[in-house]
Amino acid sequence: MGFRDARTKVIQRLKEGSVQHEARDNIDEKNLLATGEVSEAEVIDALKACRGTQHESDEHHVAPETQVEIFTPRQAGFNWYIKCYFLKPDLWFISVHRKKTQPRKKK
């Protein structure tokens, strides 16, 4: 699946509420959507700010037949890391977190 299709489908599932969260260690740091620290609307806004160069796909570490979508948009002073996959009928999130961007150094 390409960038545009993946982003469109992720946004659609977020709007529908067809979302699950993979159990993991450090969920309070690594999946802020699952903990409620960020909202679906914030994730959608970050995804809308994402460009094709800020997306990649990879195999799931446990189920290699499952394609994982990784988005790394920069939006509102943050570098986002959004990692998810589709397992019908839902979208499963592995990670949703952000870190502050570092200001560029002047030359």
Image (cartoon, grey):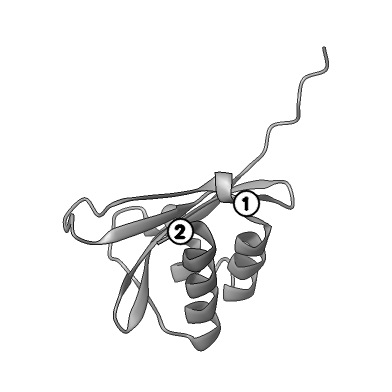
Q: Residue at x 35, y 80 (%)?
A: 90
Q: Residue at x 38, y 59 (%)?
A: 27
The quadrant holding residue 92 is: bottom left
Q: Residue at x 47, y 80 (%)?
A: 13
> Where is 30 relative to 89, above or below?
above
Where in the figure is residue 72, as x and y percent of width and height? 54, 48
Q: Which mark is residue 51?
A: 1
Q: Amino acid at mark 2?
A: Gly
**Is disc 1 placed on a helix, strand or loop?**
loop
Viewer-proximal residue, 47 or 27? 47
Q: Amino acid at mark 1?
A: Arg
3D distance between C-alphas at marks 1 and 2: 12 Å
Q: Residue furthest right?
A: 106
Left or right relative to 101: residue 25: left
The quadrant holding residue 18 is: bottom left
Q: Report crowding for label 1: few under 14, some 14 to 19, many 20 or more residues within 10 A (C-alpha).
A: some
For mark 2, what is the residue?
2
Q: Residue at x 57, y 50 (%)?
A: 52
Viewer-proximal residue, 64 or 100? 64
The mark that comes first in sequence, 1 or 2, is: 2
Where in the figure is residue 30, as x and y percent of width and height? 43, 54
Where in the figure is residue 15, as x and y percent of width and height? 55, 83
Q: How many marks?
A: 2
Q: Report crowding for label 2: few under 14, some 14 to 19, many 20 or more residues within 10 A (C-alpha).
A: few
> Where is 62 relative to 23, above or below?
above
Left or right relative to 57: residue 15: right
Q: Which mark is residue 39?
A: none
Viewer-proximal residue, 79 or 68? 68
